[in-house]
Image (cartoon, coloured by chain):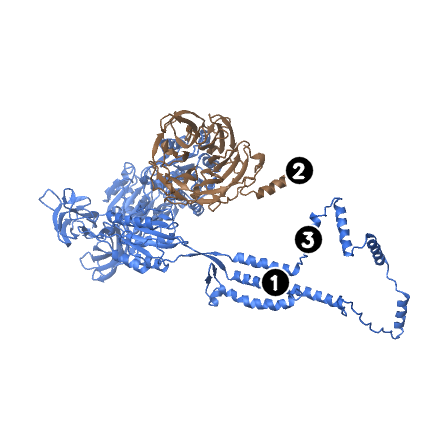
Chain colours: A blue, B brown
Amino acid sequence: MTLHLAFGIPPVSAGPIHLESPVWLLLVPVLGVWAYAMSRRSLAGLGGGLRRVSLGVRVLVILLVCGALSEPSLRRQATDVSVMVIVDASESVPMASLARAQEMVGTSLESQKRAGDRLGVVTAARDAVVMSLPTPFNREVTRTHTGRTDSTNLAAGVRLALAVMPKDAANRILLVSDGNETVGGLLQAAETARALGIPIDVAPIEYRYADEVIVDRLVAPASAREGETMNLRVVVRATRPTVGRLSITQDGDAIDLSPGEAATSVAVALKEGLNVFQASITADRNGPREFRAVFEPEREGGRVVGDTILENNQALAVTFVAGEGRALVLTENENAAGPFLEALARSNIRAEVKSAAQGPTTLTEMSAYDVIIMMDQPAYGFSQKQQSDFKQYVHDVGGGLVVLGGPNALGAGGWIGSPLEDALPVTLDIPQKRQMPRGALALVIHSCEMPEGVFYGKKVCEAAVNSLSRLDLAGIIEYSWSGATTWVHPLSPVGDGSAINRSIQNLMFGDMPDFTPSVQLALEGLSKADAGQKHVIMISDGDPQMPSDALLDKFVEARITISTVGVFPHSGMDTARMQRISQYTKGRHYVVDTQAALATIPQIFVKEAQTIRRSLIWEGNPFTPSLVMGLSDSLRGISQAPALNGYVVTGEREGLALVSMKGKEGDPILAQWQYGLGKVLVYTSDATTRWNPQWVAWPNYRAFWEQNTRWAMRPGGSANVRVVTENRGDQTLITVEALDAAGERLNFANFRGRLAAPDGSASDIELRQVGPGRYQGVVPSEAAGSYVMGLRYVAPDERSPGGVLEGTVQAAITRPFADEYRALEDNSALLTQVAQMTGGRVIRERGAVDLWTREGVELPVALRPIWLAVALAGLGLFLADVAVRRVRIDVRAMARAVRGAFGRGRVVAGEMGGLKAARDQARAKMDGREDRQAVQARAARAREVARAKFEATPEMLREGERADQGAPIAVKPAARPPVAEKGSPPAKPGEGLSRLKQAKQKARDEIEEQ
Amino acid sequence: MLVRRAAWRGVACALAAACVHGCGVAGEGVPIKPTMMVGEAGLSPGQFSYPRAMDRDGGTVWVIDKTARVQQIDPATGECLRGWRMPDWSVGKPTGITVWRRGETLRVFIADTHYHRIMVYAPEPVAADGRAMRWGEGMRLVGVFGEYGEGDGQMVYPTDVAVLTDGPDREIVRLYVSEYGGNDRVSIYEPTGEPDGYRFVRSFGRHGREAAEATFSRPQSMHIDVARRELLVADSCNHRIGRFTLEGALIGWVGGPGRGAGEMMYPYGIMALGDGTALVAEFGNSRVQHIDLERGTCLGLYGVPGREAGHLATPWAVTMLGEQAVVLDSGNNRLVGFRLSRGRLWAAGGEGGRR
């Protein structure tokens, strides 16, 4: 608690001065009285005038010191107004209405703005973006928005505007919007503005769609059994009666809604309000089935009739059709995978074979399979999103994943640090105990010229570094803006990655003028590095000066390769020059010249980092892996395995992971675990003949792979579970109706579920039993897209083996288009409420109000602390006070000195001679202008007296003898004081002693004072 | 006696150097005391996004930034008097601008680096009342020359244009165009007689690092020392300034790589002061160096790397507005003005600064 608060005295302002702690001023009278009291004693020796001056100075010193303690500041009142314009850039705003509003605002801004007034622009859609900071030179309000526009978050716009407002101007906000927000809470944000005293003026963009049709939803069962007939319902809303055609597709194939007609769509007449249409369809295949209903409005002469927004004319639904389990095998070499595929086929496991490029790209597509088998797949074959989806597929949807080794798989395939690594039952980095050859990687970063250069510069570094083993060496070179080409992170072991990741965050992304210093630095670092594989990755737009051939020859000599990544090169020549570097040193070259390709750059770096990751592969003489019996059902009936001569080195993962087959030094060969709702199995050797020539001929080959694949597969379950979803606002109600195998309602079941959202996030699903065999839960689903849910249930069932019924079920929630397109008219009421709440105005006409008005805003005051200046002034005066009492200024002496210096005082006879002459002159004056001879004679006498020894006179000796004999000593009568001559001061008895005492006392007082 | 005299001279030099504002000794720059500082990061008029080229025009300056926007800025207020965006910019943005004015006739030469050409604009005069024009207003493209290639009249990456006139306030008699990209050289163009028409005459220099001949590694900018009839070339990646006759004969090199006085790191901007000295904007050292062209010595170092007022970050250009030097503080997105210390009679760093 500060002092002024303790005394209840608030800060005060008077004119240009502001005192934060005025309580200190209370000390002024107290100390003033004290100073006066002290001055009566301590200043007694001074003359009256001097004494008053000294006392005044002391009081002033007290005033300044107390003033400094009270934290004084100079106040400066701002005179400018800053207007932050928030423009609604979402899709819901009709362009024509927005143009009108922009014109209206623009006219007002131009005509009423005063010099010094500032204008800033924020655009708001899904996110808010500052398009222009407040500046006096802004004249236009643009609607350009960088980001998605399929939703409206006005609250984010207001908060961002509040964040970038200048502090030295009065602030207003102008909100140009239709008021239809889909995300966030505008009223809460307005409450913040009100609390800060910032009015929000609103310029409503008013519109109303008279002719509009919305396909509200397509209702389909979330899950169904193969062969079951499903009933689809399409709900269409119309603002007035109109006609059009309705069509429904299943996985892109049209469903014939008009049997007997050429067209598959059906003509419908819509009445005002809700219209419901139904169609029946048989689930003929298992897996997810996607249905899409589309309303096509009638057109006359190419013009749409009865509808305005076409984006909201469709609805989407997904039904999961349960059937026999399916497997997906991802392999780049189908021939080599032949024996493995044959083993699955003989085991009655239906398998589709695809390459990584043809593989599933969404979680929904992955969910169609009960197990996904990756054969020797590198990480760079999949996008980051796919890798995350694989993880979600297992953890949240309950799918099975089998990862088979090979020279491009696991750690050697760049999976270290990938999203999928967490889902694997082994660690991909080298175990602490293993001694393996290591690689060295140098990154040369010049990404400042590419779009989002800072973002991608960091991303590529992280991607490369995080895919390395902890023993590998990595370093980063860049040109910093301070003008140096340096190792931002010196070539050193990656370890846990924390040090190098910190360095990545400190990258400065300078504009590298010349590659030569960077390449030279990389060469020096890598040449000294104790590593097997050495590699350099350079990223640039290719316009720095290129290194010389002589320098590149040294790379060839040292067997160090350079791969170059040319990002948006300025011309083909840049590409050719960078390509030449990579060809010269036997590296690879990549060209990234599209926005889509930009997102793949991290994958390129992962792939390139893999160059030094070959060290994670063990290859040698065949050995027989040891089996850990009895731990896993997947090795049932298998007691011995044939020899292997290679595998990818991994480490055992702590926890529930089970290693049932081990290789050299206990390295995992076969490991498995339950991960979330699903299961994962890893086989670190190869499933083809590369490292297992004897395995294919092994009698248990088929059984081995069947058992392991079936172990990982998602269980089908024998219950009859139906899932129905219903979107309610930004949430979805999930209803599950469960029957057991006998058709009885399944009660007391325990459902565990996960919901995977379109943005890659996931959340738990909680279901509660609300009736016999009926369970319900609510999940958030505000973003448009498909949500995939995986449910695993366990219920008591006497008829099931073990008395427990277990199974899984999948379902989907769809939001075909953003809520942005559901708005049929503006929401001016909300905007008006915001204006009223914050003291703003509703602006509907051009030039109707002054946007820059000073009314309703508080012009801020800038405070500049001056306590130091006040304190220094106090200190200066204190010294002056001392000077007043200690320094006597003899004006006449000064005048004489000046005259002596400039008048007759020219000293010509040498320095010492001049000084002697001056001394003699001074003495002559002091002695009443005596002649030099008299002065010299008196001086000689004085020297004689001083030089003589003390000797008592005979009279003094006699006086001493009488005293020894006890005789009284004659006392002379006191002499009368001499009569003072007229004009001379009266002599007082003991005057000399008294003056000495006074001087002593005065000195003591001054010491005490100080 | 000699020792005593040398000692006195050293003491006097140290005291005097300490008194000289803005001039560091022994290679140590000091923060400059800005007399003007305008501009900030942003995309609105008067704001910059990594400005990379600048030239003066009377009391104003023209600036091009990395969004390919050309702006005429009033340094007194920071206001953008007019501006436009280059017609093509997706491949790359210009890095050089040179202004020539004769009375009301104004030409703006822009080295459109990544389009391998020189663009010549004829902006209309600013209104008498000083009113700023609307964006894109009053701009007219009157000439384009150059194409991709390494032959005569072709360019790889043109970086700057230097304009030679036949006297003060006279007609253009010659243009010099510098370029890099493996074909590092300076080409000479002369008027064809047609309005704003120029033809290739010849070129000099090649890519290299040798000191005995005209070799360049990214000649980033040029300036003509009219009084001494010399062409100064900022040979950036060789960290030196080249002095040439107007016919292209090498006179000598100044500078060399390093951070000391008289040394340079990536000199990107050059401005001859007409008294045998020049200002050099050093991209790599984030400072402006005042050099004696004849002796190669440093006369003053201005600025240290940083973001504060008085600091510089990767400056690309420097010029003079009256008595005030103006540096394009690219990394800080601003123009900074400061005054040169004219009181120096000796070179900081002494004779050792010569390279």
Q: Residue B5, labelled with which disc?
A: 2
Q: Amino acid at mark 2?
A: Arg
Check disc 3 and report its element: helix, strand or loop: helix
Specify whether A916 is left or right of B112.
right
Mark 3, residues whose alpha carbon is within 10 Å: few (<14), some, or many (≥20)?
few
Q: What secondary structure is found at the residue carrying circle 1?
A: helix
Dot 2: few (<14), some (14–19), or many (≥20) neighbours within 10 Å? few
Depicted A242 relative to depicted B73: above or below:
below
Toward the left, the furthest residue is A260
> Please, what is the three-letter code of the amino acid marked with disc 1?
Val
Q: Is residue A804 left or right of residue A581?
A: left
Q: Where does the C terminus of chain A fall, quadrant-wise?
A: bottom right
* Chain at numbered mark 1: A
Marks 3/2: CA–CA distance:
40 Å
Which residue is under mark 1? A53
Looking at the image, tell me whether mark 1 or mark 3 is earlier in sequence order: 1
Looking at the rendered structure, whether the residues under marks 3 and 2 are on a common chain is answered as: no
The image quarter containing residue A464 is top left
Q: Mark 3 = which residue?
A: A895
Whether pointer 1 and pointer 3 mark residues with C-beta atoms closer than 8 Å, the reply is no
Q: Nearer the viewer, residue B248 or B71?
A: B71
**Residue A468: % across, % down:** 40, 42
How far is the residue under mark 1 from the one under mark 2? 53 Å
Relative image position of residue A11 (x, y in whole percent): 46, 63
Question: What's the CA distance linking mark 1 and mark 3?
Answer: 24 Å
Identify the amino acid type marked 3. Ala
User: Which chain is disc 3 placed on?
Assistant: A
